[in-house]
Amino acid sequence: MDLLRVVAIGAVVLGHWLLTSVTYRAGHLAGRDALLSVRWGGWVTLLLQVMPVFFVVGGYANAVSWTAHRRRGQSWTDWVRGRAARLLWPVAVYVVAAGLAVAAARSAGADRAGLARAGWLAALHLWFLPVYFLLIALTPVMLAAHRRWGLKVPAVMAAGAAVVDVAVLGPRLPLIGFANYALVWGAMHQWGFAWQDGTLTRPRGRCAALGAAGAALLIVLLARGPFPVDMIGAGERVANTAPPSIALLAFAAVQTGLLLSAEPALQRLTARPAWRKSLSRLNPTVMTVYLWHMVPVLIVAPALYPTGVLPQPAIGTALWWALRAAWIALLTAVLVPLTAFLTWMQRPLRLLPPGVGRTGWWSPALVLCGLAAAGVALARLAIGGFAPGGHLALVPSAGCVCGLTMVLCSGRPEPRDPPERDTPPSPR
């Protein structure tokens, strides 16, 4: 799991850096999706779309954590509060820092259009968190469903996702499409449960069958259906990620089947002391890298493009591709010390209690309200950015902080025995 988590975050960072093309024209910085200009770019997303890995690993980790928690006789409230607080603390730091940066840029007279674009770029990846908060809250129920019905649960969810796509594409009912955020990503989360208890890996051919079934369905959907091969952006009629489609779920089945089929070999690899040592160092930084990896873009681009240090060839040309290596190297040179500094700075957050105050009948409701407030706020930030129209997104930023406050104020955790080793949630 640690290996998959680290490799997946590396692919996310590489994909965002590679496919974000920054331009400087007439005194203004702008950015665009390079896939719009590279005809065959959609095929690259088959390698760079790794968010399914986070959800499968998250399902495994949540199953392990919740099972150990219940074995100690503790409550849903304590478990959800602890899992949510682990994610919300670094997210709140990121949101507050982004808000201060927007306020400083506005005071310095920054261009509103450029600021809005930068704020959107810095917030786009926050979409992951509202979905994951929902899955954390539902883990006890969905894990119980898995233990009773097994792989029938994600199969039914997949069928539901297909029905939703039909409703979106046929009668054109776009609001129904939001159900697929729970059905598609939730089905992957269920595969994580099946991986954890061996349902999906014993016999070994079962995960290969999942990959083969996904490949067959994906070929049909891409060849005969309206779905684009692009697994990150959007097609002309339908997107694969906003909301997620049955095509994305089929792709995730292929990816999951291949990775789990390779598990024995990967286990032997990670058993080596050098690999274990490297993963133990890198894994705690995954959440920090996920949150902050677009900040180097906002540092390097204003520093080098207006000065002419970095040329601006047409997107997709040989020179543009050649310069991608230098671009990624520069961003890496900024991200590595930034991550080290942030990891050190946020270390005291690990010592903070996951809850304060007295626990009472209101505690579960307060946890749910906190998750809802934070989830809605983060969704608004992911859609509109930190500076919509060039102004600070004060309400959603405050909503995120309020959500964390409500989760923390739901009460102190109940006394517990010394914890067993617990795997942190995806993408941490």
Image (tube, rainbow, N blue to C red):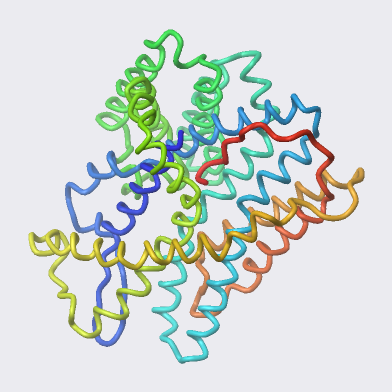
Q: Which residue lies furthest to the front in this view?
A: 273
Q: Residue furthest left?
A: 318
Name the one closer to the observer, 18 or 89. 89
183 in relation to 290, above or below: above
Residue 169, can we see it? Answer: no
Q: Quadrant of residue 295?
A: bottom left
Q: Residue 39: x, y in percent?
A: 17, 50
Name the one closer to the observer, 311 or 75. 75
16 in relation to 310, above or below: above
Name the residue rendered at 39%, 31% in the picture. Answer: 252
Name the residue rendered at 89%, 47% in the picture. Answer: 359
Q: Residue 242: x, y in percent?
A: 45, 48
* Residue 381 shown left or right of residue 65 in the figure: left
Q: Which residue lies furthest to the top in this view?
A: 203
Q: Quadrant of residue 153?
A: top right
Name the residue rendered at 39%, 79% in the picture. Answer: 114
Q: Residue 185: x, y in percent?
A: 51, 36
384 in relation to 254, above or below: below
Residue 225, can we see it? Answer: yes
* Residue 413 shown left or right of residue 36 in the figure: right
Q: Residue 122: x, y in percent?
A: 45, 66
